[in-house]
Image (tube, helix red, strand yellow):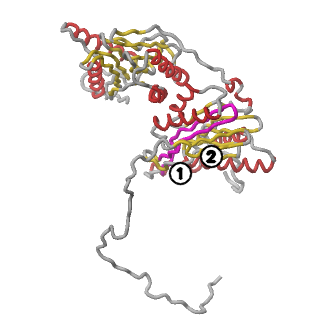
Amino acid sequence: MTGSMDLPAKGGFSFDLCRRNDMLEKKGLKLPGFRKTGTTIVGLVFQDGVVLGADTRATEGPIVADKNCEKIHFMAPNIYCCGAGTAADTEAVTDMVSSQLQLHRYATGRESRVVTALTLLKSHLFRYQGHVSAALVLGGVDCTGPHLHTVYPHGSTDTLPFATMGSGSLAAMSVFESKYKEGLTREEGIQLVAEAICAGIFNDLGSGSNVDVCVITKGKTEYLRNHQLPNPRTYVSSKGYSFTKGQTEVLSTKITQLKQTVEVAEGGDAMEE
Amino acid sequence: MGSQAPAAAGGGQTQRTQYPYVTGTSVIALKYKDGVIMACDTGASYGSTLRYKSVERIKAVGKHSLIGASGEFSDFQEILRYLDELTLSDHMWDDGNSLGPKEIHSYLTRVMYNRRNKFDPLWNSLVLGGVKKGPKGDEKYLGMVNMIGTHFEENHIATGFGNHLAIPILRAEWREDMTFEEAVKLVEKCLLVLLYRDRSSINKFQIAKITTEGSTIYPPYSLKTYWGFSHFENPAQGAVGSW
């Protein structure tokens, strides 16, 4: 492709570096892993709005990287999004769409709609052909009513009355499929969501720790961080842990000055520009 | 799995299942007050085709046990033949004692593990349940063995997809000493979720129970499904262009 390359790429994903990555891998370079969320995220529609729920464990392979992370991301005052998959991807994508929504709110002077967030997310994810590994449960209430959608990493979406995503999605879905009905009250909705997340926490190894819940209704959003803590630290030494001076035996002391003298030059040359 | 026999293997070492062809999906079982209840659907798939729709995947073994199987159906038939031989020779002893569920579970574990060690597994997950009079009265027993020989005993068992969809429900809602009606309701709850979310299950189920009186395998029936959510009616109503 001769000629100038001044124009920025119009869109789409540039796959140039993929060949280089493949070549490096064949030469023996170990590519860095990514932190996955290994998650249970759920959402359901109740009579006045939407309830979203998530667990709080972030895993890096077999290790728990963050035992109380936040998986329910802010999109707009009336729209929240739960994210499963690669933590960086879900954070970046939701932050990006959240900013775009705010700019859009300034431009239109209106409250954001859930379809807007949905379309922005799905078009971004589709452009990246599944390489942005973000599986999202998007929920909110706008002027057209309550909405709940799931967005898959490749860009497809579903509109559902109840949805689950993540490694614990089957455990949570079994709770929803057996107990969901239309027209739940707020308390019933929160209870069902908490039960579904707990099913994920206790039956899926990738999910754990606490339950986060977010209730969105017309005009009001409540983010109940750590709504339930079903995994408390059960043993804490009653005597407490003290590390007073004198507990550790000091064998010898040697003090080394870092600088013997410091010379201060009076009226020295000013630093050259 | 799926190790290939080396082309020049010395002596015609017959190998059977390297990967399954005709498969049955999940089996669920749980202990209740009078014994053990076991249920599964009556379908057998050939890859992604639903080939057989009236297959009995739960059978009685001897006087005291029920066996349910998921996985390769021909291997299940072979296992039933082994069990026939076992129960026949046990009967011929004519000593007033008969093999209980624990013994049969132990036998099956040895068979499965042995086959796995020869790289020729019986591609099944077996559920073994039963009741037999023991030193402490009627002892209920429920256990499972899978194709690599992993075996354990539990109050509630599920194989295949049931592990992901039914076990969370069973762990939350199983209680000691459930009546038969309660046990059936719980099992139906799990079967319904499996029907909705497992692509290889069909809406035709069989429940079987075993008590000290003996085993009963009920005729197949179907469950009512609910599709009337308002969101299912016009999903794109609030989000034009989505589905």
Query: Residue B158: horizontal and vertical position, in percent?
Result: 42, 24
Q: Nearer the viewer, residue B49 or B44?
A: B44
Q: CA distance from mark 2 to mark 1?
A: 34 Å
Residue A20: numbered disc:
1
Query: Residue B70: horizontal and vertical position, in percent?
Result: 41, 20
Q: Residues within 10 Å of mark 2 (few under 14, many from 20)?
A: some
Q: Residue at the bottom extreme?
A: A266
Write the residue at 66% across / 20% down: B228
Residue A124 appears in view: no
Asked whether A38 falls inside the magenta stretch, the response is: yes
Q: Nearer the viewer, residue B57 or A3?
A: B57
Query: Residue A208: horizontal and vertical position, in percent?
Result: 48, 42
Write the residue at 58% across / 36% down: A42
Amino acid type shown at disc 2: His
Label 2: which residue? Answer: A73
Q: Quadrant of residue B170?
A: top left
Q: Tell me the subunit letter for badge 1.
A: A
Give SS at disc 2: strand
